[in-house]
Image (cartoon, coloured by chain):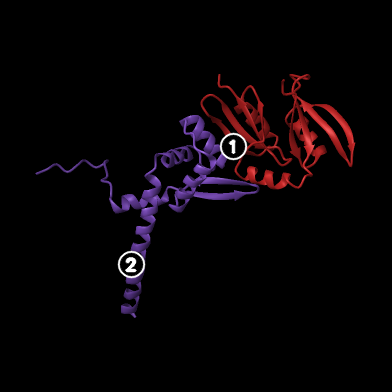
Amino acid sequence: MIGHRTARRGLIGKWQLAYAAVVADDLFKALADPTRRTILDELTEKSGQTLFEICARLSMRHQLGISRQGVSQHLAVLEAAGLVRTRREGRYKFHDLDTVPLRQITERWPVPDTSEPEESPL
Amino acid sequence: MKIHLTSVFVDDQAKALAFYTEILGFVKKHDIPLGEEHRWLTVVSPDEPGGTELLLEPAGHPAVEPYRSMIVKDGIPLAQFAVDDVHAEYERLRGLGVRFTQEPVDMGPIVTAVFDDTCGNLIQIAAKPE
């Protein structure tokens, strides 16, 4: 019984690793583009924006003259990485920010707790 | 040449007249029967009775619905109205039950917000910041 359970856990563990690698690739690809980071900045200020609002913010606040199709493509990349979620509400479609995938970065490369005094070298 | 009339397609002219006058505060300018329950129905700003008229045009043409549903889905407004203070107008309209798809945002040269006119369109209000 125990052996069987361990085997299953091992399988799930391997699958999770492979899955995490795929997710991480999408995540880092999404974050690699400055326009997509700007979209995340704007969604951080206010989550739940229409495509129109995102386009207006990019062009008017950041002087980024990107076509609506271009912005849609950036949003699709962010959505594939799990950083943006879309929601239909009645006749409108909103884009919400989801920063949960970013947690895997600090899980993979933990950040030292800066509130603790740093260990002094011997 | 100058722009004296522009139009929005509306699902129901009577309902549109109520929204555009009672909620938004425009006043009726022309109301001429055109047959088949259709009217030549225009409103103007009370501040500019001789100014640009807005035609509340019946949305009966089969091309209107697919066109509108696609642009509404992406949050794109069909018309823009000028207000003195977008934040104040947002609060006033929200108090009257108007649904906003974009809350007031300072876009730099302009402050904007977008609401649903309940007649099938999104409308943007805009003001230059003080």
Seen at 48% across and 40% down, the residue is A43
Q: Position of residue A60 (x, y in %)?
A: 51, 30
Left of A121 or right of it: where is B44? right
Q: Quadrant of residue B118?
A: top right
Q: Residues within 10 Å of mark 1 (few under 14, many from 20)?
A: many
Quarter of the C terminus of chain A within the rendering: top left
Left of B19 or right of it: where is A27? left
Say which mark, if any, is on residue A54: none
Q: Position of residue B20 (x, y in %)?
A: 75, 32
Q: Position of residue A83 (x, y in %)?
A: 44, 49
Question: Which residue in the structure is indicated by mark 2?
Answer: A14
Left of B64 or right of it: where is A32? left
Q: Quadrant of residue B42?
A: top right
- Amino acid under label 2? Lys
> Vertically, is A77 above or below B103?
below
> Vertically, is B48 above or below A14?
above
Give the distance between the C-alpha atoms of the residues marked 2 and 1, in whole angstroms: 44 Å
Question: Which residue in the structure is indicated by mark 1?
Answer: B102
Q: Which chain is red?
A: B
Report helix, strand or loop for mark 2: helix
Q: Nearer the viewer, residue B11 or A97?
A: B11
The chain letter for the residue carrying disc 1 is B
- Amino acid under label 1? Gln
Seen at 50% across and 42% down, the residue is A70
Q: Are the residues at dot 2 and dot 1 in contact (C-beta closer than 8 Å)?
A: no
> Vertically, is B100 above or below A1?
above
Q: Nearer the viewer, residue B36 or B28?
A: B36
Seen at 53% across and 37% down, the residue is A55
The chain letter for the residue carrying disc 2 is A
Report helix, strand or loop for mark 1: strand
